[in-house]
Each structure stands twice: as C-alpha cells, then as structure tokens.
Amino acid sequence: MRPLLFLLPALLAAQSEWPHFGNDPGAMRWSSLRQINSTNIAKLQPAWTFRLGKPGSEAIPVVVNGVLYVNAPDGVYALVPETGELLWKHAATPVAIRGLAYWPGGKSLNPRLFTGNGHHLLAIDTTTGKPAPGFGNEGRVDLKAGVLDGLPDGRFQLQSPPAVFHDVVITGSSNGEGAPTIGAYGDIRGWDAVTGKLLWTFHTVARPGEPGGDTWPAGAYKNRSGTNAWGFFTLDAARGILYAPLGSPTNDFYGADRTGDNLYGNSLVALDARTGKKLWHQQLVHHDIWDYDLAAPPALFDIKRNGQTIPAVAQITKMGLLFIFNRVTGEPVYGMEERPIPRSVVPGEVSAKTQPFPIKPPPLSRLDFTEKDFYDQSPEHAKFCRELFTENKMKIGAGPYVPLGLEGNDLFFPSTLGGGNWGGVSVDPTQNTLYVNVMHIGQWGHMEKKGNEYVRTSAYGTYARFWSAK
C-alpha cells in the first residue's frame, strides 16, 4: 500500500495552506517557504507515515484551515498535517485517483470537497466527512447524464479534481481516447456548488453550426469519444477564465472517419468560468494520430517584456514543445508557425499537412533518434537493443510526427509518454523561471487492419529500455 509520508513537523507548522493541487488556482506550484535548501536537505527525517487503505493514488493533497485532505481509490481522508492523525474517512469506491477540490462554503453551508466517484461528482461536507446535504442525490450527481446521446452506456469517469470558481464546480472526464470510436462525449460542464444543478455545457467536439463544426466530416461528431479534459484545469480567478487542456479524439491513432483538424481535440481552450462561453482556443496538434493529448495542467504567470506585463499561460506537451500564450487573448507570446510533417500511408487516412511549432523556446526534449543513440552502457544491454531493433524491423523517422505505417515498425520520438507529460511545469515568480521535467523516450509500432478500422500495434513494456542514457 502506498504510504503518505510527510517530513519535518516544524516545516508544516510554518506552511500556511496548499489549497489547490498547484497551490494557486493557476498551478504555478510555487511556495515562499525557504526552510529546505541545498545545505540541509540531506538531513531530512520522516516525521510520520499514514498508510492509505488501497494503493493506486496519484493524488496531490490539499491543506486548508489546518486540515490535510487526500484521495485514495477507497475513499477520501482528512488528516492532521502535523501528526498524521486521522480525523475522518469517507469510504467510497472508486474515488478519483488524482485529487479533489475545496469549496469554502456559503449561504450558511459548511465547506465542501468535490471529487470523482466513478461516473459521479461527489460532494463531501468537510466538518462531518459525510455526503453534503442538498447536493444532487444524497451528495452525488450522475455525470453520465447528458453525454451518452442515445448510447446504452459508455466509459466515463472523473479521475482528476474539478475546478471551483465561486459557486461553480467545473468537471471534465476520462471517457477513453482509443478504440472503439463510439462513446460518451467529453463535454466540460459547470455545476451549482450548492445544489448540483447543471449550469452550462461546452461541447469539446464541435457540433454542426457551432464554431469549429466544419473541422469534422458530416455526422462524424456523433458519439465521438475522447476530446476530453481528463487532467487538470487551471483558473485565472481574477478574470474568471478557465483553461482546459484537451485530449485526442477517438480513435487516437486512426482518423480516417474524422478527416479534418477535429476541433477541439488537442486544444488549449479558454472558457468563461461563469457561463462556459469559449473565449479563445489554440489547437496544438491537428488531426492527432499519435495520442499526443494535452496531458499537463496549463500554468499561469506574468511575463515582464519591454516595460509591459503580459498575462501568460504555458502548456507543455508530450511532443516536448512548450507553447506560451497571452492568457487573455490567446496570442502566442514568442511566435508560432506551421511546419510540414510526413504524411500517412494508411488507406483512408488523411493526415494533417502541417503541425504548429513555437518559435521560442526551442524543443525541450529531443525530437529524434538515430542508431548512434542505442544504449551502450553495458555489452549485454547494447546487444539486446540491437537485436530488438533488427527483429522488429524498425525504421527510424524524423521528428515527433512520424505516422505509423503498415510494414515493419516506425519509430517516433518522443513517445506518447513524454516529452512533457501530466506532471506539468512549475514557476518561480521571484526568479522569473519556469521549470519543466521532460522524458526522453521513444516508441515504435505499426498499424494493422481489424474489422473496418486500422489499430495500432505497439511494443509497450519494453520500449523504454531501448534508448540511450547519454
């Protein structure tokens, strides 16, 4: 079981709060604390350990008003942060693996926690640890309602924390991005934090007659799954703007039934948090056939440039590209251009001719791989890599947008696990520095026909051992 480990009670006593997954609503993840530094980090000792009831949590705890709240697959826990003492546990299965959101209360109501409970939005009263009275049906709202569009069922979960803006709770979903194509919509929706009433809906797959509807073939929007905000939202709380990083449309490696750019797949979308109205968008992958969904939370910060302050939002991508936009207008801060990419040879596939690249900064992870880059730190490992390459008839492509072919195995770099994945970035506003963790990992695969579609066959589980550590 995964333990929850905290260090140095004195440090926690100095910590004021950590009310959001990224500390502030804009996910800078910056703390003013200076007790831990390069001179004393080696001296840290465990202060306490609390073992969650079931493994699998990827949650980032929040600390509000002297209480620490954290998710595990078997429920939500409230702990004393200085000691690890359990205050209460709300048992529920399954609970969202990536965390929860805090609502401070109002209208004579106690504060609430909002999190996913399978395909439900769950509200918990923080004073009792029990379902919040008056919210939905005994503290839960069924999120599948309104997204199935005539389907008898469909995969749908809330795995990451919602965003909370005043009395609006905003949800995304995990509805699957792979085959089959048909499934629940990935709509973004706003709910009343008091009653659970639906307030607004933004269609992540543009419908006919809506802006972006012409980026889909006729009828292709119907029951189109994927195109989902499965990760983390961020908020410009002062302006009331929600930033949503969206995933790939289904099927995420084959798009012959969805020719066109497919808005709002793989887009950073800015919405009015009060109404759900789209303010602007930037699509960072056209017609995705690499599973290059926008996994990381956008980070909000200010840029000082030419004597002016630019309100900015940064989006790190699996391609290892960092895009930076004016978060009010959506304009690229350092420029962006379309560059030609290789075309797919899969029958029926009409891949995009170009993809967007930021002019600055340059790519943050490597975008290519050659035979000179085989791992060579031991003869045995080097032999394994060479044989793996030969036996799987691999072909080395150039850049991150290599379409998978039908024969042998094409290499594309980075893989669907990075460059930059759902960990995101951090920003130190005092040093005007943005920090990014990237992964230099490639992937190989090819397309095979199954039924009426082509599906990806790829060597998960072994490909990470292939690349050089140099």
Image (spheres, rainbow, N blue to C red):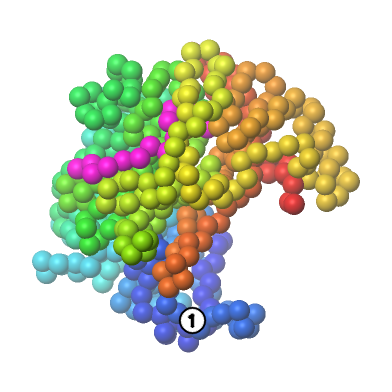
Residue at left 53%, top 72%? 5
In the rendered image of this protein, does residue 234 appear above or below residue 69? above
In the rendered image of this protein, does residue 233 appear above or below residue 246? below
In the rendered image, residue 370, in percent from the top left (x then y), is placed at: 73, 37
| Residue farthest toward the left in the current orientation of the protein | 107
In this orientation, which residue lies closer to the viewer: 383 or 63? 383
Residues rendered magenta in the picture: 277-290
Q: Is residue 183 visible?
A: no
Q: Is residue 281 magenta?
A: yes
Residue at left 19%, top 43%? 277
- Mark 1: few, some, or many residues within 10 Å (few <14, many ≥20)? few
- What amino acid does circle 1 point to? Arg
- In the rendered image, the quadrant that contains the N terminus is bottom right
Residue at left 23%, top 44%? 279
In the rendered image, residue 242, in percent from the top left (x then y), is placed at: 28, 51
In the rendered image of this protein, does residue 37 appear above or below residue 89? below
In the rendered image, residue 266, in percent from the top left (x then y), is placed at: 41, 37
In the rendered image of this protein, does residue 405 appear above or below residue 463? above
Q: Pointer 1: what residue? A: 34
In the visual, does 313 lie left or right of 134? right
Q: Is residue 138 magenta?
A: no
